[in-house]
Amino acid sequence: MKMRSAGFASLSIIQVIIIEVVMTFSVRASNNVLQTTIPLLSRYYFHYDEFDVGLLIALMSLSGMIAMIVNGIMRGDLRRYSFIIGNVVYAISFFFCFHFRGHYP
């Protein structure tokens, strides 16, 4: 059985399911890494106090909720471009994080 939908012109149902499962796990893994690593880095590496760490996590969670709402409202092409730009910014931030890693006190 072939699926005839936008972007999946010649993929079977099994292939679409496999792609969706892999994408779901990768997105959840990335989000879970951020939610568990940022508090530890901010507390022990940047020496934030408990209130600041809690505020940081609250703002991260709020921004994630706002992103989900905005993502549901956006048109498909705009959603695609914002996804690409977000991934580029994410990759660049990792470069700067590891590049300047030795320069922090």
Image (spheres, rainbow, N blue to C red):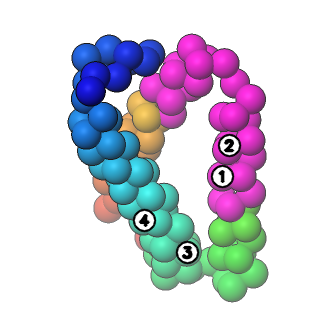
Front residue (pair 19, 95): 19
Badge 4 vs badge 1, beta-carbon distance below 8 Å: no
Badge 2 vs badge 1, beta-carbon distance below 8 Å: yes
Q: CA distance from mark 3 to mark 1?
A: 16 Å
Q: What's the residue at 74%, 46% (across, down)?
A: 66
Q: What's the residue at 67%, 83% (across, down)?
A: 49
**Along the polypeptide, which appears first: circle 2 or circle 3?**
3
Badge 2 vs badge 3, beta-carbon distance below 8 Å: no
Q: What secondary structure is marked by label 3?
A: helix
- Which circle marks residue 40 in the picture? none
Q: Is residue 87 visible?
A: yes
Rendered view: 97 above or below 4: below
Q: CA distance from mark 2 to mark 4?
A: 18 Å
Q: What secondary structure is marked by label 1?
A: helix
Q: What secondary structure is marked by label 2?
A: helix
Does 78 appear in magenta?
yes
Q: CA distance from mark 2 to mark 3?
A: 20 Å
| Residue of label 2 | 67
Badge 3 vs badge 1, beta-carbon distance below 8 Å: no
Looking at the rendered structure, the kind of residue marked 2 is Ala
Q: What secondary structure is marked by label 4?
A: helix
Position of residue 15 in the picture relative to residue 53 (left or right): left
Rendered view: 85 above or below 20: above
Quarter of the figure with the N terminus: top left
**Along the polypeptide, which appears first: circle 4 or circle 1?**
4
Q: Which residues are magenta?
A: 60-86
| Residue of label 3 | 39
Furthest residue in direction front, as rendered = 1
| Residue of label 1 | 64
